[in-house]
Image: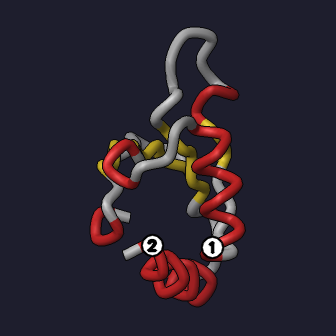
């Protein structure tokens, strides 16, 4: 995620992480999630789904996946750069 322009927040024992996409130019988290899926095929949950006042520049990524799936997602995310 960092290699594609996201600022990540490392979790402490969770199976997901939040990442700030503000450097990627999307107007909000909903557009970012939609475009990320359209461009790369990688799904993320808009940060606004978790915060009443905040999360508009965040996406939530689940990494409770098999290694080969995560490696494929990393390759797909390179389409953003």
Q: Which mark is residue 10?
A: none
* Image height of 71 relative to 77, above or below: below
In the picture of the structure, the residue carrying the numbered disc 1 is 39
Q: In the depicted view, which residue is nearer to us: 31 or 59? A: 31
Q: Please tell me how crowded label 2 is: few (under 14), some (14-19), or many (20+) other residues with Cα within 10 Å.
A: few
Q: In the depicted view, which residue is nearer to us: 18 or 29? A: 29
From the viewer's perspective, tell me whether residue 49 is left or right of residue 26.
right
Looking at the rendering, in which quadrant would you find the C terminus? Answer: bottom left
Q: How is the image coloured?
A: secondary structure
**For numbered disc 1, what is the local secondary structure?**
helix
Residue drawn at point x = 63 percent, y = 79 percent: 66
Q: Position of residue 36 (x, y in %)?
A: 61, 62
Q: In the depicted view, which residue is nearer to us: 9 or 67? A: 9
Residue 12: quadrant of the picture: top left
Q: Which mark is residue 80?
A: 2
Q: Residue furthest top?
A: 53
* Image height of 35 relative to 33, above or below: below
Looking at the rendering, in which quadrant would you find the N terminus? Answer: bottom left
Q: Please tell me how crowded label 1 is: few (under 14), some (14-19), or many (20+) other residues with Cα within 10 Å.
A: few
Residues under numbered marks 2 and 1 in contact, where contact means CB atoms less than 8 Å apart: yes
Q: CA distance from mark 2 to mark 1?
A: 8 Å
Residue drawn at point x = 59 percent, y = 18 percent: 51
Residue drawn at point x = 29 percent, y = 63 percent: 2
From the viewer's perspective, tell me whether residue 78 is left or right of residue 43.
left
Residue 53: quadrant of the picture: top right
Mark closer to the chain start, 2 or 1: 1
């Amino acid at each position: 995620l960092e290699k594609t322009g996201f600022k990540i927040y490392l979790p402490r024992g969770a199976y997901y992480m939040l990442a700030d996409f503000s450097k990627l130019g999307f107007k909000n988290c909903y557009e970012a999630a939609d475009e990320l899926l359209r461009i790369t095929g990688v799904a993320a949950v808009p940060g606004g789904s978790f915060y009443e006042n905040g999360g508009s520049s965040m996406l939530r990524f689940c990494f409770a996946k098999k290694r080969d799936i995560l490696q494929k997602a990393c390759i797909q995310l390179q389409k953003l750069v």
